[in-house]
Amino acid sequence: MRLISLAKKVVAKLLKSKISRGLMLNTMNGLSRIVTRDSTIVLCGAINGRWYGDNSRYVYEWILLNRSDLKPIWLTKNSEVFNKLESSNKPVVKIGSLDGILCLLKAEVGVFTNSLYDLAIFPFLVPSHMKLVSLRHGRSVKRIRFARNNHKISHIERVERLRESKLVKYVISTSNFISDIQEECLKLGREKHIITGYPRNDLLSLPGISDVESWKSFVGKHENNIYILYAPSWRHGRNCTSFFPFEDFSFDALSKFLKQKNIVLLLRPHVNDLITYPDLVRFLYSMDKASVNIKLATHHLFPDVNSLLPFVDALISDYSAIYHDYLLLDKPMLFIPYDSLDFEQQNGFLYDYHQLLPGPSITNQSELLSHIEMITTGKDLYSTPRRKLRNLVHYYQDNNARERVLTLIDKLTN
């Protein structure tokens, strides 16, 4: 197994060399001149090919239902996603397969969320004729990529991001405020940022049938409980995210309180934390097993968090882009920014985090339970700051982002 792993690393390193990058790109560009293009194909990918969700999913599904003149194709590395979509008779191909390569050669337009790895096994397999719409994974308060404090980027990432920027024709945004801070992070050109709203937010107020069915299956007979989602941000691998980082933390007190108030607390760690930190996994699963009022809601159960947001009554987070989306539902939010000083030094914030915080900043379990109790009684002390930030982050507050994104796609296909 070690030899196989080592061999894969060596092959990957060779494929990312300057010679290999040039060879891949020249080969794909040469083949693209031979293969007949189909301007009706729209390639859709997300989250580095690992999951089915995010903004690309909602554009893909909207095209399937509303635009018979277009041929959306989902690209994925995930066999489970591939099999599920194929069994539903939805157009899907495997990234890196012959069909995947042919799609890259034939299509002229694609949409993605994270990087060119959403569409290809290597970024330099995306031919130069491709015109891309960057739908983004969301814009949070934290500085990322080029805007990050003490920013360091590897040579290969710099090359890949440069390649990406050349192919991106539009990058969607939710407001001028977000466009300005997003350009700090992406360096794509301010003129490319177009305000459409995020397609994934179109169904927040009116979720689709499949999402309703998934939710009902998940909650079972406890549908009438109060549901609170606890979804903190990823710490970029510097350290493990801490759930309940309180000196006065007591599982027994928390469990008893939740039971008394008829509350189910949903725990959603970042997928990277689940992969990297086995101690965190054991801690969270032990809580899930020990209390019927605490449940895990991981990416394996809900690959797309926006399919979960419509059904929860409140959100607990810190710096995640989730809370920007949740603003549209105008429901209570609580914040546990236990490492905000460290986060501000390491990443930095794109705006004054604490000044615009749309909910209480919680430092201990007593405060947490007190604020949750206020939610259960309908006492809402933060509606004004919540709506202030909502109006700053979201220019459009309707359900038509998908249509506005399709307008951009139409411009690229005509």
Image (cartoon, rainbow, N blue to C red):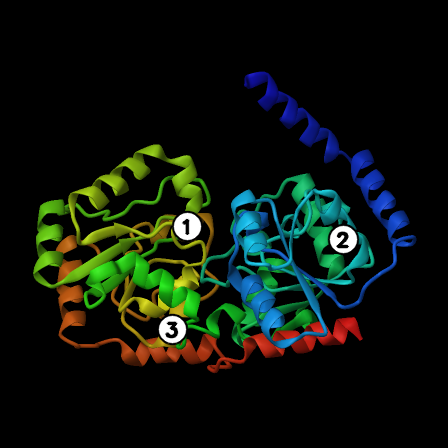
Residue type, mark 2 in image: Leu
Q: Which residue is mark 1?
A: 299
Q: What percent of the width, then of the height, locates residue 222?
A: 20, 62
The residue at the point 13 percent across, 74 percent down is 377
Would you name the residue on which mark 2 appears? 104
Q: Which callout, 2 or 1, points at the residue further toward the start of the chain?
A: 2
Crowding at mark 2 (Cα within 10 Å: few <14, some 14-19, many 20+): many
Q: Quadrant of residue 336?
A: bottom left
Q: Quadrant of residue 322?
A: bottom left
The residue at which mark 3 appears reads as 327
Q: Nearer the viewer, mark 1 or mark 3?
A: 1
Q: Label 1, secondary structure: give it.
A: loop
**In the image, which is nearer the foreground, mark 3 or mark 2?**
2
> Front-most of 323 and 346?
323
Q: Are marks 1 and 3 in contact (CB under 8 Å)?
A: no
Q: Which residue type carries mark 3?
A: Leu
Instruction: Report how far apart the C-alphas of labels 3 and 2 lie in the structure.
Output: 37 Å
Q: Position of residue 234 (x, y in %)?
A: 42, 48
User: Please, what is the three-letter code of the amino acid marked with disc 1?
Assistant: His
Question: Which corner quadrant of the image does residue 66 belong to?
Answer: bottom right
